[in-house]
Image (spheres, rainbow, N blue to C red):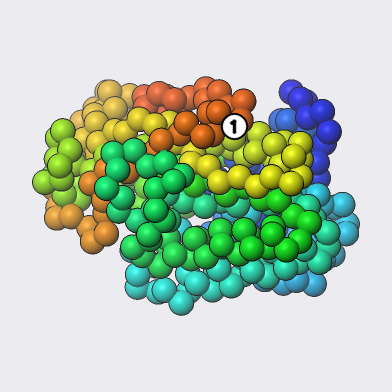
Amino acid sequence: MNDAKHPVPVLVTGGAGYIGSHAVLALRDAGHPVAVIDNLSTGFRFAVPDDVPFYEGDIADEALLARIFAEQGTRAVMHFAGSIVVPESVEKPLDYYLNNTVKSRALIAAAVAAGVPHFIFSSTAATYGMPDAERVSEDTPQQPINPYGWSKLMTERMLADTAAAHTLNYCALRYFNVAGADPHGRSGQSTAGATHLIKVAVEAALGKRAHVAVYGTDYKTPDGTGVRDYIHVSDLAAAHVLALQALVAEPGRSLQMNCGYGRGFSVMEVLDAVDRVTNMAIDRRIEGRRAGDPGALVSDNARIMATLPWEPKYADLDTIVAHALAWERKLSEFRNQE
């Protein structure tokens, strides 16, 4: 399908990673020329289609970025490269400020120097910290409680200040809990030792883990376990393509939007869905709360629904689980052949 009225050459940073690889697929499906830069520290070369120009390198390498922008005629950056594990950010804060903030500054500087006019940033609901609101809107105060959230919020701030001073507009998309895999089996969550609940649960279903830990059963939620807003990675990728088109249509406007479905599921509800989809019972081990985990984090997605012509296709928990499971099986076959 080629529905891009005006194709925009895009550089995707972290395009060999989980969400970035799905954005590459969505951009190509929409008819936009794409190139990828990734240092492969957590990404996988096989996640990038063979016909997509690939640069193995670091987003802090401004000379390399200048060359890529010139070679590819880049008009937009979609920035996914970074570190994402919250507990690790508490243990290694300087690593997170380097990877997520300092290197983002270098990337933004290179984009400004090359005259790249549009920038889409992979931000996070972690910038809100532990909000009191049942649903988190973009007007909810951003008060991170860990270095990961702060490192992302600092980059949002840099983009806002840069957009005020230069010919650049941006969109910061604040993700809730991303899960699932490409429905056509082209990409998925491939990271070993991932901490995402649905990834962990489908690994357990396939015997790759002995059990699933449930951290905390005493939250003020219907069943006592943490509630999160799970969004299918392909719906998220589609939102990025629409955000790009919005930035191109109105060069003077920047956007900050939540990316979620506005519906929460508890840990137990997610595990029940995995049991349903796999027709088996996963071993659940109850453990204590993890530090810094809010009881519930659910998006108010009114702004993105009003701003973009975004129509989620996979807003169904069992569908998200089924796609994650299919990818996990494919990954097992792929690694067995290596």
| Residue 119 makes an appearance in the image | yes
Q: Is residue 161 left or right of residue 313?
A: right
Which percent across, then down, holds residue 327? 48, 35
In depth, the one of 202 and 269 nearer the eye is: 269
Circle 1 residue: 307
User: Residue at the bottom extreme?
Assistant: 94
Question: Residue type at mark 1?
Answer: Thr
| Image quadrant where one finds the N terminus | top right
Quadrant in the picture for residue 269: top left
Q: In percent of the image, x 88 and y 57: which residue is there? A: 71
Q: Quadrant of residue 282?
A: top left
Q: Which one is in front, 186 or 180?
A: 180
Is residue 14 in view?
Answer: no
Please state which of residues 280 and 335 is positioned toward the viewer in this rendering. 280
Q: Is residue 76 left or right of residue 228?
A: right
Residue at screen point 42% across, 41% down: 137
